Image (tube, rainbow, N blue to C red):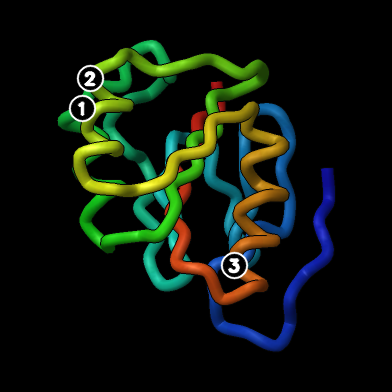
């Protein structure tokens, strides 16, 4: 799915998502990724959503976002309670959705100048 490109900012907009990869600033990434307006961490350690742990999520918390988006792959899945507890303890909102919806939502929140971080899984 091709998204409209924001040509007026240097932010890490997601320009395209297809099952198995995401495109950011012309670069195709086919591994799990953490993305914010300013940072891009390709090859995030949990390769698939079922491997996600609270320790992995500390990387999502580091930039102190207002909201975290988890793109769980082809279908929506929910994390373990300890992960949700970690976000709640840090008073960070979290939205959990399939990766296609997560990409769209990330771009919308970014265009609103929201401090958003997304953890996206390709599988």
**CB atoms of marks 1 and 2 within 8 Å:** yes
Figure quadrant of residue 64: bottom left
Q: Nearer the viewer, residue 28 or 4?
A: 4
Which residue is under mark 2? Answer: 82
Residue 89 falls left or right of residue 33: left
Within 10 angstroms of label 1, few (less than 14), some, or many (20 or more) residues? some
Within 10 angstroms of label 2, few (less than 14), some, or many (20 or more) residues? few
Give percent across and percent down for residue 53: 24, 22
Figure quadrant of residue 32: top left
The vertical placement of 36 against 20, above or below, is: below
Give percent across and percent down for residue 63: 27, 62
Q: Nearer the viewer, residue 55 or 4?
A: 55
| Image point (77%, 69%), residue name | 5
Residue 30 falls left or right of residue 49: right
Q: CA distance from mark 1 to mark 2?
A: 6 Å
Kindly identify which numbered label has been placed on residue 54.
1
Report the quarter where the N terminus lies.
top right
Give percent across and percent down for residue 123: 55, 20
| Image point (40%, 59%), residue name | 66
Which residue is under mark 3? Answer: 110
Nearest to viewer (mark 2 / mark 3): 2
If you read the primary sequence from the N terminus, does the residue marked by circle 2 or circle 3 appear first? Answer: 2
């Amino acid at each position: 799915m091709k998204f409209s490109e924001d040509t007026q900012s240097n932010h890490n907009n997601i320009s395209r998502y297809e099952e198995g990869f995401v495109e950011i600033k012309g670069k195709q990434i086919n591994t799990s990724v953490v993305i914010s307006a300013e940072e891009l961490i390709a090859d995030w350690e949990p390769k698939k959503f079922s491997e996600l742990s609270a320790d992995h999520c500390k990387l999502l918390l580091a930039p102190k976002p207002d909201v975290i988006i988890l793109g769980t792959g082809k279908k929506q899945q929910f994390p373990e309670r300890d992960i949700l507890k970690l976000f709640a303890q840090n008073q960070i909102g979290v939205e959990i959705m399939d990766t296609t919806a997560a990409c769209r939502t990330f771009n919308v929140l970014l265009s609103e100048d929201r401090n958003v971080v997304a953890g996206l899984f390709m599988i």
